[in-house]
Image (cartoon, grey):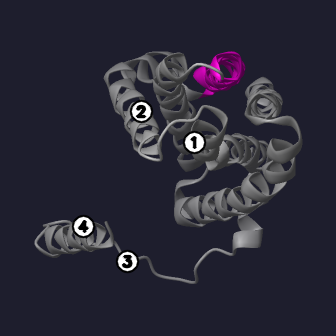
Amino acid sequence: VFAAVALLAATAVAGLSVSSLRDTRKSGPAPSPLGALAVPGILPLLIACGAFMTAFYGVYGYLGDHLHEGLGEPVSANGLAAIAYGLGFGAAALLDGVIDRLGARRVMPFAYLLVAAVYVAIASASGAFGLLMATIAVWGLANHFGLNVLVMRLTALDAARRGTIMGLNSAVTYFAVTVGTAGFGPLYTALGFANCALVAALLMLVAASAAAWRSARQ
């Protein structure tokens, strides 16, 4: 597996090396990450990012164990779950025109409410393998929209600080990886996978509220 990943990485490096794209260098000092926090609208979006990513990693981090220990499926079922999620995530690209027509600011709260509804569906389907796989595919589709609108709104805040803003987004995402996996562990052990999904749904309500608050302020 690691050899395959290394081969794909080498292929990506080779492709970039022959690409005609070149970096655009800017003069002057680089914007301060802390200074970027003063950009109007960034804090609600970072809160939305944190809640969105914590919900995802909190559920996805324990999905494999639930499939194996909870449902008695072989370890290979984890791969099927990843495929189902990936198919849904990729299929959503065919619907990205909806965001272009309606605008990311308008779509974002509803996209996060959709993800919240999917987490409730995951909790309901957690006892049936086939139904859970179908729900995971829908999860991938919904998360595609959630991620796209988040990136679109962040990059539209301030073109001069776009790189710094996306760096803050990455920092919040990695923090959410830690919080999601560590925080949901005791919850999964004590209350089970379905309740993890319900807590994730509550986090998505936080994300939707942050997105809607920013929409109302503009």
Q: Amino acid at mark 4?
A: Ala
Q: Is residue 91 magenta?
A: no
Residue 57 appears anywhere in the view = yes
User: Closer to the N terminus: mark 2 or mark 4?
Assistant: 4
Q: Position of residue 56 (x, y in %)?
A: 65, 42
Viewer-nearest of discs 4 and 3? 4
Q: Spatial distance from mark 2 to mark 4, Cα to Cα? A: 22 Å
Contact between labelled residues 1 and 2, with CB atoms less than 8 Å apart: no
User: Closer to the N terminus: mark 2 or mark 1?
Assistant: 1
The quadrant in which the N terminus is found is: bottom left
Q: Spatial distance from mark 2 to mark 1, Cα to Cα? A: 23 Å
Residue on which disc 2 sits:
89
Please give the name of the residue rendered at 61% of the width and 31% of the height, measured from the top-left corner: 71
Instruction: Report the disc number at residue 68.
Output: 1
Viewer-nearest of discs 2 and 1? 1
Which contiguous range is marked in magenta?
A: 105-126
Characterize the local packing of mark 3: few (<14), some (14-19) or many (20 or more) Cα atoms within 10 angstroms: few
Choose between 144 and 197: the one closer to the eye: 197
User: Closer to the N terminus: mark 4 or mark 3?
Assistant: 4
Q: Position of residue 79 (x, y in %)?
A: 40, 44
Q: Position of residue 170 (x, y in %)?
A: 61, 61
Instruction: Report the disc number at residue 4.
Output: 4
Counting the numbered discs, the total is 4
Q: Spatial distance from mark 4 to mark 3, Cα to Cα? A: 34 Å
Residue on which disc 3 sits:
25
Q: Spatial distance from mark 2 to mark 3, Cα to Cα? A: 33 Å
Q: Is residue 109 magenta?
A: yes
Characterize the local packing of mark 1: few (<14), some (14-19) or many (20 or more) Cα atoms within 10 angstroms: some
User: Closer to the N terminus: mark 1 or mark 3?
Assistant: 3
Image: 140 above or below 3:
above
